[in-house]
Amino acid sequence: MAHQDYEDDDEHYVVIERHSGSTKSLLIGLAVGAGLALLFAPASGEETRRQLRMRAQKVRRAAQDAVTEAKDTVVGVVEDARARVEEQIDGARQAIELKKRQVVRAVDAGREAAEQAREELEQRLADTKAAYQSGARKG
């Protein structure tokens, strides 16, 4: 089995993943892991400073990525919520318009029925009046 020399490998890092935690915890974990890796890996002062710069850049990129991801997630959640609210509002508007048309039709039908009833009543009154006047003249 071949032995690989890890002293030249700049990819010493610790990944701490937490699905329900905060970004702050992630960043602290990354920083602590990077610091521990540097403490236990023998290197010169210049090499240590270079590694610290690289780790700091990685932590900065990870923080920026985490912020971007969180921002995208929040924006996505807000847009989804807005879309659902707009759908519900549109549904309510459609239901109101349907009820409004039904009420208008019912009012129109009621007016027409009242007009017909009034005309029938006026005709009966006219017929009764005519019959009364006809009977009054004979008598």
Image (cartoon, rainbow, N blue to C red):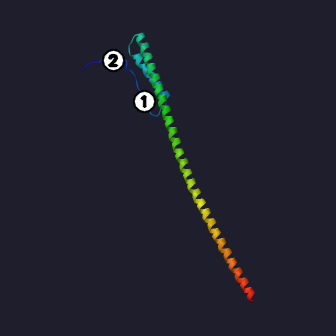
* In this rendering, position of residue 69 left or right of residue 112: left
Which of 38/75 is in front? 75
Which of 136/105 is in front? 136
**Which quadrant is the N terminus positioned in?**
top left
Q: Position of residue 82 (x, y in %)?
A: 53, 41
Q: Residue 51 got which mark?
A: none
Q: Position of residue 98 (x, y in %)?
A: 56, 56
What's the distance in space between the residues labelled 2 and 1, CA to CA?
24 Å
Quarter holding residue 101: bottom right
Q: Helix or strand or loop: what does disc 1 sit on?
A: loop
Residue drawn at point x = 65 percent, y = 74 percent: 120
Q: Earlier in the sequence, mark 2 or mark 1?
A: 2
Quarter holding residue 29: top left
Q: Residue furthest left?
A: 1
* Count of residue discs: 2
Which of 9/41 is in front? 9
Q: Up-down: is 4 above or below 119?
A: above
Label 1: how many Cα within 10 Å (few below 14, some 14–19, many 20+): few
